[in-house]
Amino acid sequence: MNERDIERRLRDVVEGRRPPAPESLHRFLREMPESEADRRLGPIARVRWALARASALVPPQPFGRQMRLAAGLALAVLIGLAGGAVLIDLRQTPAAPVASESLPAIATPRVTPPRSMSAPPSAAEASLGLKNLTADGLAVANRGMALPTTAIVTRSGEYLGVTDSTFGGASGASGVVHSGDGLFWDWSPPTEINPQAAILTSIASDNLDTIVVTGGAQGMDGVTDGRIWVSVDDGATWQEVADESAFKGVMVQVVVHGAGQFVALGWNDVSSADTLRPVAEWQSVDGLTWTRVTSPIKGTAAVIVPTAAGFLLSGTPLTPGAIDEPPMWHSPDGVTWTRSKAIDNTAQLIGPLVSATVTARSHVYAISTSNDGWSHTLAASADGGLTWSIVKPDASLPSAASISHVASLNSHDPQYGDVEYLFATLSQGGPNVYVSTNGGVTWKVAQDTGAGGPTGTTLLELGSGYLAGKTRILSFGVPGTGLGIWRIDVPPGT
Amino acid sequence: MTFVDLAEPVLDDAYRLAGYLLGDATEAQDAVQDALTRSWQAWPTLRDQGKFEPWFDRILVNVCRDRLRKRRGVRVEELNDELTVYTEDPFRAALAENEVAGLMRVLNADQRIVVGLRFWRDLSLQQIADLLGIPLGTVQSRLHYALRALRDEADRTARAGGLSAQARR
């Protein structure tokens, strides 16, 4: 069956089938309050309204969803009135506990990228190999385990990651996943984080004992509130940040650590109005106490990475910049942001970033959207994000416009010395993991040393999460669309 | 125009979109109700009433995406076929009768949404990009990889069927 057959059969699904909305839906709509006062119902009045709507819906069933909806709303308000922290959505059938698959943890030394390199960039041809991680012959994605979108290495040398909708095995859900070696992940969310009630989005560590997990949960009022959980003992125990009001109405989407503090960003993507709202930003030194600060960007997307000088932020500007100012900012503390500059009149070619990586030499490579709105441009900064220029790869990279993600790694090559590796994944078919050792000018396909190989497999989403260490990068794939985790081995390090 | 005036004409299409995305009539009804409630609350922020439908569709798709995500944490118990009354649910029936649609389980929520909007809502790729608020290239790649995943799964299923037939012989 080829893809045209697939398309044709998909279209057949709806051929001649146009079931109309049931009358109960029309009735639900017609009975919605129209006045502004009704729209701004207080919690009690809203429960009354919801109860009235529930009774007007389709034929009631024993313990039907209408009753659960009403009961859920009422309970949520009661909890809210009592100062409780959680809105319980009783419309959702409680999920069965996901069986945790315990695998022997393999102790792995903590890997930390070198922070300074003395050797100049090498022109060495990288002899890298991608290996799919099938130590026992099984593809990771087929093991039914949740794979992380972002992950950290804990102080004790283990890995913690969070899953979201894109990733996850058959038993996966939004939550925290754990690995002893970065290869095999088990679904072991800390009990303090309820994956059924929240969607987790990001994880960051201060490289000491504090780990922060971000996310959000939607209440019965349809409003998504941000959530932050913190562990101050290297992941052993967790607590939710008590000050919920700080995250009211906005999902916390990403958290990073740099310059001695955590910085988190939040936005919603529920309606077009969200594209006009400022991106929320919070700052915390200890992960427990968060302060809302003002970000210079708006909308429903942002990229933030820690740099040697603080943080680099990119998104849609709240206010237009000068002609030489791309939509990027740098900050020493995550609070005061300064607009970056572009050199060589290239600012107009650099749009909001979709991916960025900071090398051990503080070079920053980033993928930005370009003027046409969807092709991508590779930009680079040699000063930690203060000034930017465009990198134009040569013909060795088949399509610079389709780079979807960049990652970097430093290692010591026995022949060429210290080498700064830059990886790019392409969103097109064919070979789609490339590596460059000269700052993105020339590229070569990462060699495949495993079964199947990167050629022809789906690596588009691989770059969405990775761990960079001294000797390897782990990338995470999409179950059902290719193998799950690939390891990129580099020459032996020093 | 009132909110009801704007929402009433799009209700059937919204219900069908949710139904095919979620594969369940009851859940589709819940999703549309959720989307109506959310959009009703956010309606004052809609500046151009002429863009109500794509605005509402975007909210509905987000509701469906949330539901698809939450589903992954739920253990699905297979029912005895004799007890499953597909005929009462037009969406279940349509999806169950189509050999490719039955493979949609291999897609993640985002891929499923793009496939649904393309083939069941008949939107162009640009319309999908506008509706979802994502770049056209992302839509293209999601669709590309979704179709490839469906093709691979179809091939796997066919191979497995052939092997089991051989084993029976």
Image (spheres, coloured by chain):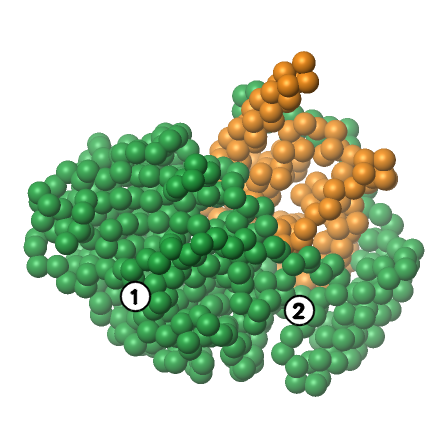
Q: Which residue is mark 2?
A: A219
Q: Position of residue A459 (x, y in %)?
A: 40, 39
Q: Nearer the viewer, residue A395 or B130?
A: A395
Label 1 SS = strand
Whether pointer 2 and pointer 1 mark residues with C-beta atoms closer than 8 Å, the reply is no
Q: Position of residue A288 (x, y in %)?
A: 45, 81
Tell me where residue B133 appears, x and y as whole percent: 51, 50
Question: Is A139 placed above or below B61 here?
Answer: above
| Label located before the other in sequence (2 or 1) | 2
- In this view of the protein, can residue A244 be seen by the observer? yes
Q: Image quadrant for the C terminus of chain B? A: top right
Which residue is depicted at the point 23% across and 40% down?
Answer: A128
Chain assigned orange = B
Query: Which residue sits at x=59%, y=63%?
Result: A195
Q: Which residue is mark 1?
A: A306
Q: Say if A333 sits above or below A102 in the image.
A: below
Q: Amino acid at mark 1?
A: Pro
Q: For the residue labelled by badge 2, is the local secondary structure a helix, a strand or a loop?
A: loop
**Looking at numbered disc 2 in the image, what kind of residue is underneath it?**
Gly
Q: Is residue A281 visible?
A: no
Distance CA(mark 2)–CA(mark 1): 32 Å
